[in-house]
Image (cartoon, rainbow, N blue to C red):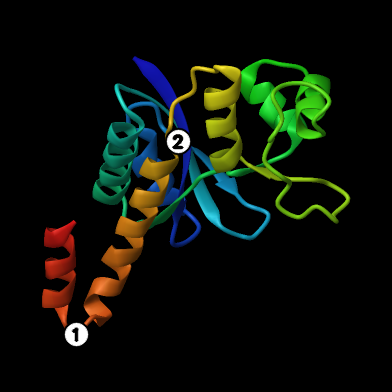
């Protein structure tokens, strides 16, 4: 069984009662505050699939506390050093792939190329690593995107007047 690492963003800063409720969870999360001021719960959860780990964590957080999960932080933007750490290679070899001096070429472009630090999208890099370099990496990006869309829809449902439209769209999918 694989251990999945993910962050759940909650609607407010956890207080003392939240800490108590979270402490009794299996593999309790670490509490973090992001640079953007978001309040996050960092999980390391064993599960057969990432979707199972995330769904169980959301249910446990919301059942044990009055915190509301608003999204999954996907840690998509990475530096070359962070990409290298994820795949167990040196930063230099990943840099050479990125500039086209090694490997098959076609490494995804940085997200904001004119910045001092270049960030790359893991959602773009991981398929490149799987398809062109033969890395055995899980394809978790659709699960993260779908989870965030479901959480966003859950938040919007009370404001939607024509729920039949949503039901029809979901039924057609």
Image position of 3 with respect to 24: above or below:
above
Residue at 74 percent across and 38 percent down: it is 79
Q: Quarter holding the N terminus?
A: top left
Residue 105 position, x and y percent, is 71, 30
**In this figure, which residue is indicated by the disc labeled 1?**
161
Do tag 2 and tag 1 residues touch (Cβ < 8 Å)? no
Residue 6's tag is none
Element class at badge 2: loop
Lower position in the chain sequence, tag 2 or tag 1: 2
Decide if residue 68 is in sight here.
Answer: no
Q: How many marks?
A: 2
Residue at 53 percent across and 42 percent down: it is 31
Front position in the image: 8 or 75: 75
Residue 14 position, x and y percent, is 46, 53
Decide if residue 91 is in sight here.
Answer: yes
Residue 133 position, x and y percent, is 60, 19
Task: Specify the farthest residue to the bottom.
Answer: 161
Residue 153 position, x and y percent, is 29, 65
Nearer mark to the viewer, of 2 and 1: 1
Task: Specify the farthest residue to the right.
Answer: 116
Image position of 67 with respect to 24: above or below:
below
**In this figure, which residue is indicated by the disc labeled 2?**
29
């Amino acid at each position: 069984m694989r251990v999945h690492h993910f962050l759940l963003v909650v609607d407010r800063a956890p207080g003392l009662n939240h800490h108590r409720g979270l402490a009794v969870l299996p593999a309790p999360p670490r509490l973090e505050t992001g640079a953007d001021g978001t309040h996050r719960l960092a999980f390391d959860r064993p599960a057969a699939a990432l979707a199972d780990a995330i769904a169980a964590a959301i249910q446990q957080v919301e059942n044990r506390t009055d915190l509301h999960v608003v999204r999954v932080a996907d840690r998509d933007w990475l530096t070359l050093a962070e990409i290298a750490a994820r795949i167990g290679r040196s930063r230099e070899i990943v840099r050479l792939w990125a500039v086209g001096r090694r490997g098959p070429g076609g490494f995804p472009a940085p997200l904001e190329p004119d910045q001092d630090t270049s960030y790359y999208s893991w959602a773009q890099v991981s398929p490149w690593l799987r398809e062109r370099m033969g890395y055995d990496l899980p394809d978790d990006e659709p699960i993260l995107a779908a989870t965030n869309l479901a959480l966003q829809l859950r938040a919007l449902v009370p404001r939607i007047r024509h729920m039949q439209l949503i039901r029809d769209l979901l039924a057609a999918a």
